[in-house]
Amino acid sequence: MEKEKKITILGEEVTLKFNMAVEISFEKITGKAFSECDMKMQENLVALYYACIVTNNPETKLTIGDLVEKTSGKDIALLSTAVSEVMTAWMEPSPFEAAEEEEGDDGKNV
């Protein structure tokens, strides 16, 4: 899975990646702890999408209002899929972590 995606929203190409900086941006936008947010609520999803955009594209002219008022359902679906994919990729173990998980207690591969 790709750890970075490029998509076009409202005519602007944006790069999407997920990391702790996005979580912090989300918390600043919403005033809520990332770990405690209900991602079934639209306001939280839009805040997450926007946090992914502004964190990775600080020069963007897009606003959270643009996402809510001007973005088509098709583009929101594209954005949702891309954010979901980069979040999933970020949570996957690195090759080093995967190798460590395969080792037994004695440090030998099982």
Image: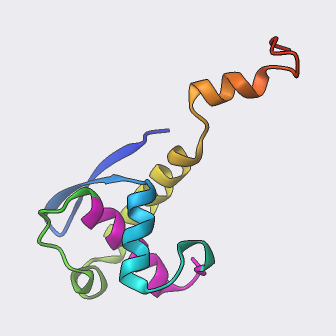
Q: Give the left or right position of residue 77, taking residue 101 as reference.
A: left
Looking at the picture, tell me which residue is in the foreground, 47 or 103.
103
**Which residue lies most toward the top here?**
108
In the image, residue 27 sits, relative to residue 83, either above or below, namely: below
In percent of width and height, residue 61 lies at 11, 72
Q: Which residue is found at the position 58% from the left and 80% from the top?
A: 37
Chosen colour scheme: rainbow
Looking at the picture, tell me which residue is in the foreground, 23 or 106.
106
Answer whether residue 64 is magenta in the image.
no
* Number of residue marks: 0
Q: Give the left or right position of residue 55, taking residue 43 as reference.
A: left
Q: Quadrant of residue 53?
A: bottom left
In percent of width and height, residue 54 lies at 25, 66
In percent of width and height, residue 85 lies at 49, 51
Looking at the picture, tell me which residue is in the foreground, 84 or 10.
84
Q: Which residue is found at the position 26% from the left and 78% from the top?
A: 71
Q: Give the left or right position of residue 49, taking residue 40 as reference.
A: left
Q: Which residue is found at the position 60% from the left and 81% from the top?
A: 38
Q: In which quarter of the image is residue 14?
A: bottom left
Magenta-highlighted residues:
37-55
Looking at the picture, tell me which residue is in the foreground, 78 or 88.
88
Answer whether residue 50 is magenta in the image.
yes
In the image, residue 101 sits, relative to residue 51, either above or below, namely: above
Q: In which quarter of the image is the C terminus?
A: top right
Q: Which residue is found at the position 62% from the left and 78% from the top?
A: 36
